[in-house]
């Protein structure tokens, strides 16, 4: 028989993994993440001890070799965006969906008057236990299940029956993610507009500045630097416009995506939810239609491609033997210690 899980105080080493000292799911979840734990739970549930030990060894190896996140995320990640999409933000977004659902149901008469406001009063000031929600993902399969369970437990008994009424886990997760994405896309749009403005200024300043034109990296007829910058600006603006047309739809379909048991009220609630949350209203629930996610990913890829084009051009044009452009310099910026006279295009990277 496989050993049972117990305390979270054991060190992540093979020597301590005696039957009575297996690290808890919470500990390994925190150390390695639910994705890496999947093989462990699969082996555990199938009672395959050999597979279990092999999978657990890999998890422990990961746990003992943590990734230096602080070194990797700066300056390549927006700290404001990271903070706006953390665990607490996800909980807040899921709660926003659930409270909005109660409100639209109350408006239609499916929930008694005053219930939605009582829910809001009791839950907006409540302290959701993020750690317990995170641990519950491993057994529930998604973050909504432990969140809904915890939210119901925080409500007064007379309100519990109206919590999460007519919804399913995917409704909560998808809608919450759309809520988190909405301000991030607005921030990205603002950044792209700033880039467009800067590119326009640079283009006008160098409208007559000659430079070498190239074909397959080989020198050809002359062009102007202003023309090159114009192409950069066009690429950014085209991708910005494509991203601006992306719709972030609310998700609400119930257990099998057809508002079972609610007749036409389900579609009415879905439209009202979209309006209340500031999201797009889909024609139908999109539980099995992942086009909205695909469209968003494709639009973001176009933005990345436009930015990459500029970065590559700058990297090539700043080569020592070319030296046609240079990035702004500052003490310690882009200067590797062995080559103090060399300035690498750090921003382009």
Image: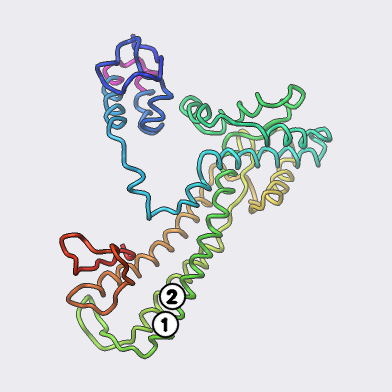
Q: Is residue 79 left or right of residue 122?
A: left
Q: Position of residue 294 (x, y in %)?
A: 48, 52
* Front residue of this view, candidates 250 and 32: 32
- Residue hosting label 1: 203
The quarter of the picture where the C terminus appears is bottom left
Q: Is residue 128 left or right of residue 162?
A: left
Of badges 1 and 2, nearer the viewer stands 1
The outermost residue toward the bottom is 208
The quarter of the picture where the N terminus appears is top left
Q: Are marks 1 and 2 in contact (CB under 8 Å)?
A: yes
- Residue hosting label 2: 233
Residue 228: in magenta span: no
Q: Position of residue 191 (x, y in %)?
A: 49, 65
Tell me where the magenta segment starts and ends, as one range: 42-52
The outermost residue toward the left is 338
Say which quarter of the image contains residue 12: top left
Secondary element under disc 1, as helix, strand or loop, is helix
């Amino acid at each position: 028989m496989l050993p049972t899980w117990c305390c979270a105080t054991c060190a992540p080493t093979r020597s301590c993994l005696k039957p009575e000292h297996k690290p808890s799911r919470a500990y390994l979840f925190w150390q390695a993440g639910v994705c890496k734990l999947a093989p462990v739970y699969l082996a555990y549930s199938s009672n395959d001890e050999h597979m279990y030990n092999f999978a657990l060894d890999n998890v422990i190896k990961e746990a003992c070799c943590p990734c230096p996140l602080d070194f990797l995320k700066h300056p390549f990640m927006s700290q404001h965006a990271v903070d706006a999409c953390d665990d607490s933000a996800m909980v807040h977004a899921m709660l926003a969906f659930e409270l909005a659902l109660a409100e639209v149901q109350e408006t239609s008469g499916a929930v008694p008057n005053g219930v939605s406001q009582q829910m809001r009063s009791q839950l907006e000031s409540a302290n959701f236990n993020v750690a317990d929600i995170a641990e519950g993902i491993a057994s529930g399969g998604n973050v909504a299940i432990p969140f809904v369970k915890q939210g119901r437990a925080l409500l007064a008994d007379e309100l519990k029956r109206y919590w999460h009424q007519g919804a399913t886990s995917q409704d909560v997760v998808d809608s919450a993610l759309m809520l988190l994405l909405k301000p991030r896309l607005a921030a990205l749009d603002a950044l792209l507009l700033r880039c467009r403005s800067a590119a326009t200024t640079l283009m006008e300043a160098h409208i007559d500045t000659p430079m070498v034109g190239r074909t397959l990296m080989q020198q050809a007829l002359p062009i102007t630097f202003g023309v090159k910058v114009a192409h950069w600006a066009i690429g950014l603006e085209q991708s910005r416009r494509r991203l601006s047309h992306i719709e972030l739809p609310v998700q609400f379909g119930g257990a099998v995506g057809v508002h079972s048991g609610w007749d036409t009220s389900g579609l009415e609630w879905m439209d009202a939810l979209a309006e209340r949350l500031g999201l797009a209203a889909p024609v139908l629930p999109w539980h099995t239609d992942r086009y909205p996610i695909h469209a968003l990913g494709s639009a973001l890829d176009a933005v990345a491609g436009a930015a990459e084009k500029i970065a590559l051009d700058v990297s090539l044009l700043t080569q020592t033997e070319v030296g046609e452009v240079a990035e702004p310099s500052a003490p310690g910026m882009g200067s590797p210690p062995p080559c103090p006279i060399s300035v690498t295009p750090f921003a382009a990277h």
